[in-house]
Amino acid sequence: LITSVLILLLSNVLAGLLNPLVASSRSDNSIRAGWEPWAPYQYMEHRNDRSRLTGLDIELLREVFEKELELELDLPEIAWNEHLRQLELGERDVAAGASLVTERKKYAYFSKPYRHSEIVIYMNRRGHDLSRFKSTKSFVRELREGSSRIEIVPGYYYGEELQSFIDDESNKARIVTAEDVEINLRNLLDGSV
């Protein structure tokens, strides 16, 4: 289990916009954010033949930017890795639900934490003795010594130990990527990973 602090990533552009002197010179009254399927934080709720984007992160973004700052919030569905890339390029202003990672400090500011969560590893029970994994360290050791594959969402941070395995070029053939967590779980359930 890896505990993660989730925060808002604010691009350098947004930090400038929140400065009253810079904001008064900008004609665009919008904040460019985004979302990906990640219930209960960011998801599309379907009721009575209607769909509504909601979740903890989405409602927080609406409260801060639409209600408090009276800005228009642009929220397209976007893959996390692409969201981070656009944030770095100044094409997006904010990302919710981010973990504080040193690499991201190069292009973004971080808010104070607004929630804590744990990163967990899901495995298919078939053919696996899950009791032998007492920690992330033992799981990563097993990955290094075995031939199992793991599926990740590009751009997600998985904690120092697992991230080092993911970032190691010699392990690339054993890493499968999916656009979001929902796809990861479907692939696990159908046995494709």
Image (spheres, helix red, strand yellow):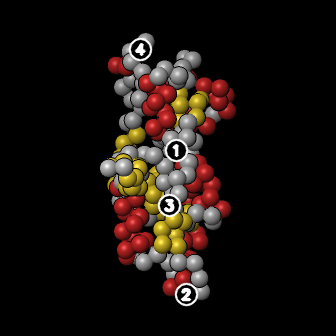
Q: CA distance from mark 4 to mark 1?
A: 26 Å
Between 92 and 73, the one nearer to me in the picture: 73
Q: CA distance from mark 2 to mark 1?
A: 35 Å
Residue 107 in picture, x, y percent from top left: 60, 62
Disc 1 secondary structure class: loop
Q: Which residue is mark 2?
A: 24
Between 83 and 1, the one nearer to me in the picture: 83
Q: CA distance from mark 2 to mark 3?
A: 23 Å
Q: Which residue is mark 1?
A: 156
Q: Residue at x 50, y 85 (%)?
A: 20
Q: Amino acid at mark 2?
A: Ser
Q: How many marks?
A: 4
Q: Nearer the viewer, mark 4 or mark 1?
A: 4
Label 1 crowd bin: few (<14), some (14–19), many (20+), radius 10 Å: some
Residue 146 position (above or below residue 75)? above
Q: Amino acid at mark 4?
A: Arg
Q: Nearer the viewer, mark 2 or mark 1?
A: 2
Q: Which mark is residue 75?
A: 3
Disc 2 secondary structure class: loop
Q: Earlier in the sequence, mark 2 or mark 1?
A: 2
Q: Is any part of residue 11 visible from this angle?
A: yes
Q: Residue at x 55, y 87 (%)?
A: 24
Q: Which residue is mark 4?
A: 126
Furthest residue in direction left, as rendered: 48
Q: Earlier in the sequence, mark 3 or mark 1?
A: 3
Q: Amino acid at mark 1?
A: Tyr
> Is the C-beta separation of discs 3 and 1 under 8 Å?
no
